[in-house]
Image (tube, helix red, strand yellow):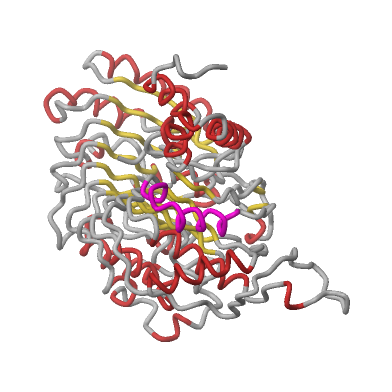
Amino acid sequence: MESYSVPNEIIVQICSYLCSHCQNPGVFPNSNTVETRIEKVTLARMCRSSKRICSIAQPILFHYYACGNLARSVHTEFSEHYADWNRERWNLEDDKLAVFVRTLITRPDLASCVESLQLKGSGKQDVCTPELMKILGDAGSALGFKLPTGWSWGGWTGKYPDVWTDEVKPESFNENRLDFHKWLMAVAIALTPRTETLMYMCEYIYELDWSTNTPPMVLPALKTLALRGAQGGDYYLFQIHPFLTAAPNLQTLYALNCRGDAISSIILLSFDYNDGDPWVEDLAVSKLRKLVLDELPMEAFEKLMERCVELEDLVYYIHFWHDCPDITRAFSQTEKRLKKLCFGYLPDPVPTGYESLLDDEDYGTIPIVTSLREFTQLEELVIDQALLYRKSDSSRDTERLEGLLPPSIRRVHFTYVYKSMYEDLIYLASVAPGSFPKLQSVKIGLVSPIPPERVEEIEHMKTVEPAFADVGVHVSWEENVMGPFLYTAIPGGAPGLTVTSVPSAPLPFP
């Protein structure tokens, strides 16, 4: 087909329709789903159709790189063994990172087009010819990078064997392939200074320390960073220091699995586990506007909040009741700039039902949230019912919600609601015009399934809708299923998976 009659603007628009980065702003692009792979292949073929189309399509093709090696499935059913629940199933492929880095080296014009990266450690063999190794080595040296352990100028030409035999030639395979791939990831980051969003998955606890073989980087364009563990190999919050210092303009941080393996690791022996300072003392988080994280020790969480002086949007999940912090105390030393707060417990899918999780003796000691009125700029609140009411509490203390919310509130979302809040909700509707003039919506997430003994009171609670409608407040309902998949807290963090999302699935990042 002759393309010369088609205006450049139309070709740009066609190409943008084939770019996941262009079509889904605020969401990390991926290479896991069939759709994104087809789009990427189609865009690459367009680049080969003619020089004119290539000049237009190729910069769009390089808007993002995604390794594609995210989980293919997740075991979400109940298991008596905690380690088996939410276990991700992988089918790792060659992510072609070495070839991508070669293009960045030889085509700096295309390197400047990269705006989003998704990188993950890999146990797969990076097949590299001697010519490619020279290109990589020379570029790494020019950047000031030390060559990783096991570097071979001759490269590696074979598929890494599952079983070693006498017929296998060791020189064809890289026994230090993990270090080499980590080095490649650091080179890719250094060569793409216009990257605005980065998702980085570490497979091993030491992997975030990529700075050991590299000089200090500066990533002035990086605004959004998502860090997560992989295959059970989590990291520690204090290990993200190189990323934060390299990104002076970072605004949004997703730090999931940032507690490491707190049971078996010897790292924690070097400091007091209950002292929050070693977790956060060097972290450059003072400019963060949005923070999404989970499972920190209480003391570390409080110290972190003291340092996040510009924070406007906080999403925090706990996995165990004994880690539940006192939200108001955590912000007592800082100006309360929060506009959005999402705070909740992610329940395991136990067969005994949600309420059985509230029988845990640790739950009886958590600090119940009674008032957020000091948060004078808070506009949106997402919070579990269990963090507002103990199991034995009556919902007839009708002024409870009035005392909880600040006058600035616009949207309220109660999650994992397992018992009636009828009286408190009716009272909230009655005082909304005077006490909460900006209130627009109330959403109630009901625990699913609802136990038979609770059905009648829950159905009665739904009759609050007319009272709110009379004062111009919209009421909506949703199901909250136990066993949500943590990485749905990252926009684009669980592509192609059929899993339960965390309550109030996050909006695209700015």
| Residues shaded magenta | 96-112
Spot occupied by residue 456 in the image (x, y as percentages of width and height): 51, 25
**Looking at this view, is 134 or 158 the one in front?**
134
Image quadrant where residue 99 sits: bottom right
Residue 39 position, x and y percent, is 56, 32
Q: Quadrant of residue 379?
A: top left
| Residue 87 percent coordinates (x, y) | 64, 55
Which residue occupies the foreground of this view, 109 or 294?
A: 109
- Predominant secondary structure in magenta? helix
Could you tell me which quadrant the C terminus lies in?
top left
Camera sees residue 392: no
The answer to whether 257 appears left or right of 128 in the picture is: left
Q: Residue at x 65, y 74 (%)?
A: 154
Where is 81 relative to 417, above or below?
below
What is the total number of numbered labels drawn onto the structure image? 0
330 within the magenta span: no
Along the line of sight, the residue nearer the viewer: 413 or 361: 413
